[in-house]
Amino acid sequence: MSPEFWWYVTRASALIAWVLLVISVTWGILLSTRVLKPNDNPSWLLDLHRWLSGLAVTFTALHMFSLYIDSYAPFSAADLFIPFHSTYVQVTSLGKWPIVLGVLCAYLLIAVQSTSLLMKILPRRFWKAIHYLSYAVVLMVSFHAGWSGTDVRAWMYRVVAILLIMLTTAALIVRILFPKSARTLSATVEKRRPNQLSEVKRSMYVRTVTHPATGIKSLTFADALVSELPTWVPGSHITLHLPDGMKRQYSLCGDPADRSGYEIAVLLSQQSRGGSKFVHEELHEGSTVEVSGPHNHFELEPSSEYVFVAGGIGITPIKSMIESLPARRNWRLLYAGRSRESMAFADALEQAFPERVIIHADDEKGAPPNLDDFLGGTSSPVYVCGPEPLLNALMERVPVGKLHYERFSAVARDTEEGIAEYEVTMSHSGKTFSVQQQDSLLEAITKNGGGLISSCGEGVCGTCEVRVLEGKPLHRDSVTSDEDKDEIGVMYPCVSRSSSAKLVLDI
């Protein structure tokens, strides 16, 4: 073996560890800010982030081991693990500090990586505080490499170093400009599209029709003018613009990678207000209808493990979620319904994932599912879509920060009407107008040129969301908890109104 072998290993492992660390931090920023939505996928971003972090630690360990073995600049074990112990000096004016930074970086890397492996059992705030040290590690490694390396004067090394520093700087700027809400909401709010004056609609035709279960009709819509439709991620829905001004939202249940069409499954509701009845009776292969979206208020957030619960037709968004996850991702699904014949995709899911999917048909089991047994004290995020009784049962069992849900219909709210008259100011135009107690705030905004998008009109879909700059709303919607809305400062004026004399809205 060449006497210079370990010297080359030392130099190469150091540079590779630095590159991996920078890319890992950059990927972590993409993961936390989700600036690439909807073209990214939280699952593979999380996997790659962890893989890169593990490799960075591995090459750091190799770098330290080769320093110990190499005789060019002798380092003892104490030199590698005890700050200020080594006498090696590359830049006289800086003394031992470059090596000290390297030793500290090794400890910080170990702390970040070990707490990440234990994040399920650690307090969330503690884990985040330690994880933020990765930014300091990148900065310290840059100085350590520049002040202690033997290749500093080589032009190739300088090019790589400059590129790494530029990438780190760009990543930090993205992190500052696109901060993520500190709290995960039951319905993701910070990336919605509020205050748009119009909603893009496209004419689409029904390409295929199937019947995956009794009373359920599955339709795939395509656009004759384009071969690739806008991208979407699991949990998204489209809006069908039906006759007489009806707008109905239906979750996409197909493959997000297939951009040739949008697939939905619609249950014929006995209490239909016209939407599901029209879909079942009037839409056939070749029929045309105006479609807008996709939009997403029920997004799958990054996690190493998931728990899914679906009730009846609530399987539609859940199906796309579980089918988008990597094979090695840990998840389990409880799919409940009145009878197997009425449960769309039940047999297909059970056959595809026999060890992960539990099908609970009431007529087979003779009783509702035991949620306590299924949840088993899990600390994983729980995603649920289904009827209100199922959602209420999970709300009693799952902490607010862990429960993510989508509702079928509005819940009964209190009858408080708010004050008799209040003043509304639209901050963009500066226009101010009064709204009476019996008037719709959304209609008043539209009448005065606000032009908010609206859809369900019942405070369920979240389409008309607007940010509140001043004043206190009286929430009457069912999108998410009132505490969550007040924390981030939004309201849904299709059903909500004001409990203060003045509202200033970000319109």
Image (cartoon, rainbow, N blue to C red):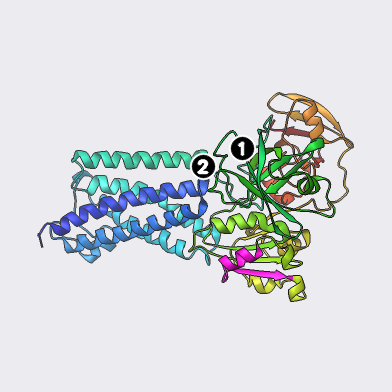
Residue 358 is covered by the magenta coloring? yes
Indicate the quadrant containing the N terminus: top left, top right, bottom left or bottom right.
bottom left
Q: Residue at x 20, y 57 (%)?
A: 9
Residue 67 is covered by the magenta coloring? no
Q: Check disc 1 and give the amino acid type.
A: Asp
Residue 432: percent from left, percent from top: 78, 25
Q: Residue at x 68, y 38 (%)?
A: 291
Alpha carbons under labels 1 and 2: distance apart: 28 Å
Regarding mark 1 in the picture, which secondary structure is present there? loop
User: In front of the other: label 1 or label 2?
Assistant: 1
> In the orientation shown, which residue stands out farthest toward the left?
2
Q: Residue at x 77, y 34 (%)?
A: 503
Residue 179 placement, left or right of 166? right
Seen from the viewer's position, the closer of residues 152 and 190 is: 190
Q: Residues within 10 Å of mark 1 (few under 14, many from 20)?
A: some
Q: Is residue 482 above or below residue 70?
A: above
Residue 63: percent from left, percent from top: 25, 58
Magenta-highlighted residues: 346-361
- Residue 239's image quarter? top right
Name the residue tied to disc 2: 35
